[in-house]
Structure formats: structure tokens, C-alpha cells
Image (tube, rainbow, N blue to C red):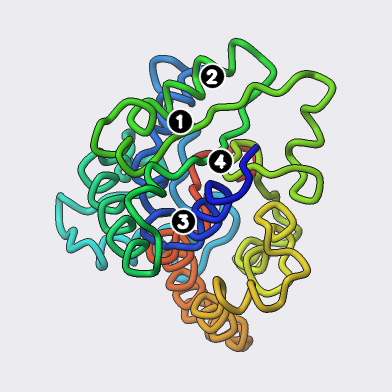
Amino acid sequence: NKVGAKKDAATKAVKNANFRLGFLYGFNALEYLKQWNADEPFQRLNRAWTNYNLCSAGGKDYDDYVSDVYNRENGLTGDAAVSLAGVLQKSDPVYSAAKAKEKFAAAKTELKAAGLTDADFPVTIDVVGSTSADDQAFEKAALDLLLKDNDIKAVLDLNYIVPTNDDDQTRWTTTASDYDFNFLTGWGPDYADPQTYAGCWSYDGDMLNNSGLDGNAALQEEILAPYQAKFEAAVAITDPAQTVERYKAFAEAEYAAIYTYGLMVPWYGRGGYS
């Protein structure tokens, strides 16, 4: 839906980690999850990528190791420590209007230093919604901060697209369309080890066809190289006696993928699907 300077600006923006992290913190997942449980939407919330209850070691669920990294990196100890699994946390520990504004402001500064000008802002980002009117209401509620906050709107113009039934499927495939954000990408495990999720975002991983990175080795190197190093360090731990160490290493990689590099916005987990 974008051409020329608008398309170039969007391409540069989505390559910026702080720009992506703005979406992470500005996406109000619990508003979307109310469509399944209005009273306790946190029952389906998952702010890690790996689904809870996939595997455990050392008396802990793997996702608890990811929460440990989150708490350490955010200085959360004692009663302030959180779980990224909504069913345990009973709230969303990630959504933050303040952090979203902070990340978008940082992104604007970085993007201007990299060559964008004031004329390039706000950057237009296409978000493909659902064909269901019921779903659209929850999608817009989840995006409300991004759509309405004046500080964010100075950086971001969110173009919410309602596809027709005819083009609904093609709009979700990177090769057939040009969207920037979608709701319906996810993964279910092939085996009970965190590598089944972590591998999705490695070089030529299974999720790259949904991200514009598939088949583009140079772009994968540009965007994924720091994550790839952490992923490979975890994969290299293969001794069954070191399963705890393996899980801790994957937890470091998973935290970085989400909260350092902003490769994805995890928000849902149920029945193995995340």
C-alpha cells in the first residue's frame, strides 16, 4: 500500500529495533484476549515465545527460565518479580504506555541520524486486520495506544487495513503482499525442547517467511546475527546432564529475541500454539 519515500521510510523503520520494541510495549494484549474471556483475559496471555508447559528441567518449567531473565534484566526482585505466563501472573507485565513512547522516541532519533528527515514522519505502517467485524473491535482495542496517543502518532501512522474475504489469505503471505504487522502468525511445537520455538527465528527458520526475511541471506545477517549467536550457543549444549544449562541458554536467546531485538510481539499461548 506504500510507494516511493513512504515505502522507503517504512522499510528503514521496521529494521530499527527500538521501533519494533515500541509495538511490543504498546500492544495491549489483554484487550484482544477479552474476546475469549472478558473477565480473565490473562488466562491465554503468554509474553514469552515458547508455550508454557512445553518442557521442564531442574524442577522448573522452561518458560520460568525466560521469566528469570526478564526479571534480572528489568531489575525485578522479590515481590516485584513477574511471570511472563499470564495464567500465573494474572496480569500483563509488559504492556506500558510509557515504554512504548520511550522506544518510539528513541527510534525517531536513531532513524533521523540514519538519514530520515522530519518529512518522513509519521512513518506509515500497514496492519492487516481480520475480515471478522467482531475480531476487528478487539484488534483496534489492542492497538488503541498506537492509534490515539499523540506522542506515538508523531512517529507512527498506523494504517489499519480490513481485507476482503477474497484477498484475506494472500495478504498474510509476504510474497503476495506488503504489510508490516499482522496478528495471526504463530507456531506450535514439533518436539518438547525450546529449540523447536527458538529455531523459528534462526537463519532460514520457519517464521522468516512471515517476516520478509525468507531467502534473503544479507537481510537475515543484518537483522538476526546477534540472535543467531545466542541461538547457536544454546544449540551447542547437548549433554543431557546439562539440560538446565541448555534451557538457561535458550532463555537468554528468547529474551533477547523479544525484549532486546524486538523480532516478535508474543501475546498468546494456548494448547501448544503460541
- Please tell me which residue is depicted at 39% across the width and 15% down the height of the picture: 39
The residues tagged by marks 4 and 2 sit, at their Cα atoms, a distance apart of 12 Å
Residue 77, above or below 185: below
The residues tagged by marks 4 and 3 sit, at their Cα atoms, a distance apart of 28 Å
In the rendered structure, are the residues bearing label 2 and label 3 in contact, judged by CB atoms less than 8 Å apart? no
Can you tell which mark lies on residue 13?
A: 3
Callout 2: few (<14), some (14-19), or many (20+) C-alpha neighbours within 10 Å? few
Secondary structure, mark 4, is loop
Query: Which numbered disc, 3 or 1, marks the residue closer to the eye?
Result: 3
- Please tell me which residue is depicted at 42% across the width and 64% down the height of the picture: 255
Secondary structure, mark 1, is helix
Q: Which residue is mark 4?
A: 269
Quadrant in the rendering for residue 145: top left
Q: Which residue is mark 1?
A: 43
Secondary structure, mark 2, is loop
Amino acid on which the number 2 mark rests in the picture: Trp
Query: Which numbered disc, 4 or 3, marks the residue closer to the eye?
Result: 3
Q: Is residue 196 left or right of residue 39?
A: right
Secondary structure, mark 3, is helix
